[in-house]
Image (cartoon, rainbow, N blue to C red):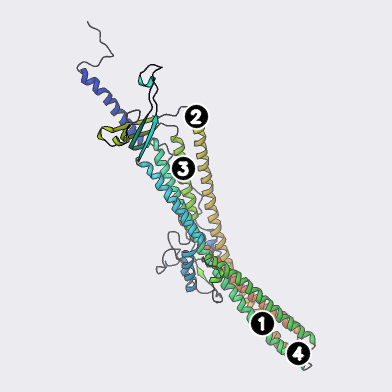
Amino acid sequence: MNAINMNSPAPGLGLAGRLLRPARIGSALLAALLVLAGCSVAPTYERPSVDTPAAFKEAAGENGSQWKAAQPAEDIARGEWWKIFNDDSLNTLEERAQQANQDLKAAAARLGQARALTRDARSGYFPQVDAGIGATRQRPSPASQGLPADANTQPFTLYRAQVGVSYEVDLFGRVSSNVDAATADAQRSEALFHSVLLALQADVAQQYFQVRELDAALELYRGTVELRGQSLKLVQRRFDEGDISEVDVARAKSELASAQSEALGIMRQRASAEHALAILLGSTPAEFSLPARPLTRISIGIPAGLPSALLERRPDIAAAERAMAAANARVGVAKSAFFPSLNLTGGLGYESAQLGDLFNWSSRTFLLGPLVGTALSMPLFDGGRRQAGVDRARASYEEQVASYRGTVLNAFREVEDNLANLRILGDQNRAQDEAVAASARAAKLSHTQYREGAVSYFDVIDADRTVLQQQRVSVQLDGERARSTVNLIRALGGGWGELPAATQLSSAK
């Protein structure tokens, strides 16, 4: 019996079998690589859970809800939340700010950069093709030509013109993880752009109401100056008639000058507020002027909605969530460094020792990689560099998780703060209205009694001061209420996604 040689081809295969075996091995290797190309070592991204209350604490008072369920404002374009104030001047300023504000333009430029980086990352999905032409001057060694060591070789010039192709196979998801990270970064930049836009819209509205509040205060002081001027004339006449002493005249002049000084102080504050508004609009203070118009009481109900909806409405929360997604994808990029990488390279063109023969058909040449057009590299030892990269990526992800949860908590606090502000301001307005009415009544009685000689002029001055003080506080509360309404809309996400449903309520009494 003849012994069977285990190293020889199987019976019946012969020469054809020996020739086909490398092709089969290469096909199997290629199939295995294609399967690996569909694998990814990136961790599956899931949004971390956050503790979300069932309802806002300040959305309901002791006697039930303070916020009426409003009908959607269908006539208001989404995102244009400021139109619920029904103020044409404010509408114009908001549109102007969105066209010219420099901070918003900078945010738009940052968004453009992030989107360009996403396109750059996506280019890794495609082969890179380049072309070039050049010349090299070289002298081969005798050994490379199979000549004796003392043989003389001549230098020569080699001209080349070729097209090169390179392609990285996406083994273990390195390229796709890079794309996922860049895409999440772009989405984060878009959310930050909306955050800057919302902040700009809110700042314009707040600064506008600040100017209007100062207009109301200035109107109040102008009225006070006029009344004190009339009182001075009355006191001066009584002094001329010998009914009173000069002390009352001096006091009347002092109160008039004091009111005039305070009116000038308010004018100074208004000028500064108007200048700040001009900058928000992208204009110099010299190019902008806002006609005076006193602020009237704003009483708009903004339904707070459910706390869970806040996670979908606020752009800063969306930005923090996208930052987490990007950090998660970069964990996959770092982990892919532990696995082999596959690069396909090749070149096709012409080379010739004579420049005039470069593009002859006989000068054509091609170059492939070392292993059937592939270059497969496998990391073995790097002293812990790749593991450090993974640890850093994971720590960065944990940082973004903590930042996300902190952003959510801060959002809940801002909503609760502004709900509380508006609820308490409503009660404060009602109490202040009573204080204004009572002080005005007391001042009127004191003037009557002074004319009858029943009280001194000091009592009149004290009563007038009290009226002015109470009216000034009332104006400040109206301004604070307008700004708190804007702050609540901003805290709820403003025009991010859906327009916050709002309705005009009756004026507070």
Q: CA distance from mark 3 to mark 2?
A: 24 Å
Mark closer to the chain start, 2 or 4: 2
Position of 125 with respect to 418 (left or right) is: left
Of badges 1 and 4, nearer the viewer stands 1
**Residue underneath mark 3:** 328
| Disc 1 packing (10 Å; few <14; some 14–19; many ≥20) | many
Q: CA distance from mark 1 to mark 4?
A: 24 Å
Residue at the left extreme, as displayed = 12
Q: Please tell me the numbered disc located at residue 453.
A: 4
Mark closer to the chain start, 1 or 3: 1
* x and y percentages locating residue 267 in the rendered image: 63, 74
Q: CA distance from mark 2 to mark 4?
A: 100 Å
Q: Please tell me the numbered disc located at residue 225.
A: 1
Mark closer to the chain start, 1 or 4: 1
* x and y percentages locating residue 149 in the rendered image: 40, 17
Q: Secondary structure at mark 4?
A: loop
> Mark 2–mark 1 contact, CB under 8 Å?
no
Q: Secondary structure at mark 3?
A: helix
Classify residue 238 by image quadrant.
bottom right
Q: Is residue 483 above or below residue 146?
A: below
* x and y percentages locating residue 167 in the rendered image: 36, 37
> Mark 2–mark 4 contact, CB under 8 Å?
no
Q: Secondary structure at mark 1?
A: helix
State the quadrant of the N terminus.
top left
Answer whether residue 117 is visible to the viewer in this image: yes
Mark closer to the chain start, 2 or 1: 1
